[in-house]
Image (spheres, grey):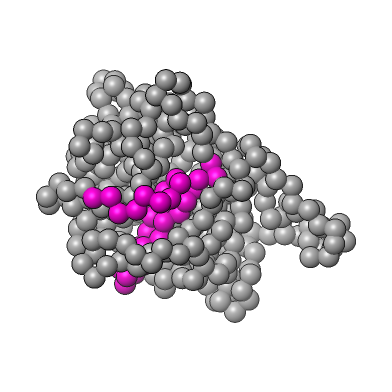
Amino acid sequence: MPYHFFRDVTNDTFESTFGSTSVPNDTSFAQVNNADFLVFDRQRGLALLGPSPSYEFVFDVSSAVHEAPVFVPTQNKLYLSQLAPPPGFLPQLVIDLNQNPPTLSEFLSDPPVYAPNGGTIHNGLIYWGASGGNDSIGGTEQRSGIRTLDPATNETTTLLNNYFGYYFNTVDDLFVHPNGDVWFTDPTYAWFNQLTDTPPQLEPATYRFTPSTGAVSVVEDTIVQPNGIAISPDAHTIYITDSGAINGVISPYLPSSGSSFNTTNKRTIYAYNVSTDAKYLYNKRPIYLAQDLVPDGLKIARNGYVVTGAGKGVDVLDAEGTLLVRVQTNYTVQNFAWTGSDWQTFWMMGEGGISKVEWDLRGQQLT
């Protein structure tokens, strides 16, 4: 960049973007803000976008956090959640892709699941990380944990809701390993976002849960706020995001005071090798420092590219963390999912919007 340039930041709530950088001696830089796609690696970036990429803003939704998208191919529907505000919201959302144009509606599972924050599909069941906890919500007590939803019957089942009697903080994101184990992150955001009535009881950590035995093992506890988690197509590498730049004060004696954003704290994606028995992680290394806000939702494309929602957009990286393409949005993206028979249509959702991209980057086929 030609001097003098300046990207304004704050240590509170203002979200600056790369495009908001002031570069008065390069008038062409103003075009960055208006682009749907920013290409940082010409060869690989244009290849993943394909010959005619498109971006479309589809649904104007509330300013609440929208998370946990799961595509059910047998129904051709995309399930997702709506979190606070307001606290205590129980219905979830579903996009019916059989309609033209697609429709968005509410649905309520039986029993309801409070505040799903991350999700995937495995053997026909939706696995949700339920992030909320309350003594009485919708007439029942709910605690953060892992639930399954059978989309054919609308019935839910609780698989996990405690660690030796401790409440989990915020079961945030998860995936199911080919061997059936569920790996999940547990930051403390439910307390900051008033999704739970109990202060955190555990350190932020990442766990491995074996449904066949009920065993829960901590696999990572060095990350400030573990958030997104995903596994490579060959199951040899696991990626975890640290969104510790968004954090707050925790005390069992004080009410939640919310959270704030500090650009100098952790907003990094880490990669780990997986042991041959798929029991533990090693060789932690940082691969990407988010260029906008924090890395939130995280998934791995079919070709091994790493995809993360970061601020007002989605970043596509190679497996080593080199930024290839950014999809820009006018709202903060929390999560995303691939849909369609070829897993090529890419839906994004977050605070105030749901949009989609058509490109040549395909997602992993999950059923």
Q: Is residue 270 depicted above or below 17 in this figure?
A: below
Is residue 197 one of those drawn in magenta? no
- Residue 363 visible at all: no
Q: Quadrant of residue 74?
A: bottom left
Q: Is residue 248 depicted above or below 152 in this figure?
A: above
Q: Quadrant of residue 117?
A: top left
Residue drawn at x 61%, y 52% is 292
Q: Relative to the observer, which residue lies in front, 124 or 58?
A: 124
Q: Relative to the observer, which residue lies in front, 311 or 367?
A: 311
Left or right: 124 as drawn, with respect to 352: left
Q: How many marks?
A: 0
Q: Quadrant of the N terminus?
A: bottom right
Q: Relative to the observer, which residue lies in front, 43 or 362?
A: 43
Highlighted range, magenta: 217-246
Q: Is residue 236 depicted above or below 219 in this figure?
A: below
Residue drawn at x 45%, y 60% is 270
Q: Quadrant of the C terminus?
A: bottom left
Residue drawn at x 51%, y 34% is 248
Rendering coords of residue 172 (x, y %): 37, 44
Left or right: 364 as drawn, with respect to 262: left
Is residue 236 one of those drawn in magenta? yes
Q: Is residue 42 depicted above or below 173 in this figure?
A: below
Rendering coords of residue 26 (x, y %): 84, 63
Q: Quadrant of residue 130?
A: top left
Rendering coords of residue 267 (x, y %): 54, 52
- Residue 54 visible at all: yes
Residue drawn at x 29%, y 20% is 136
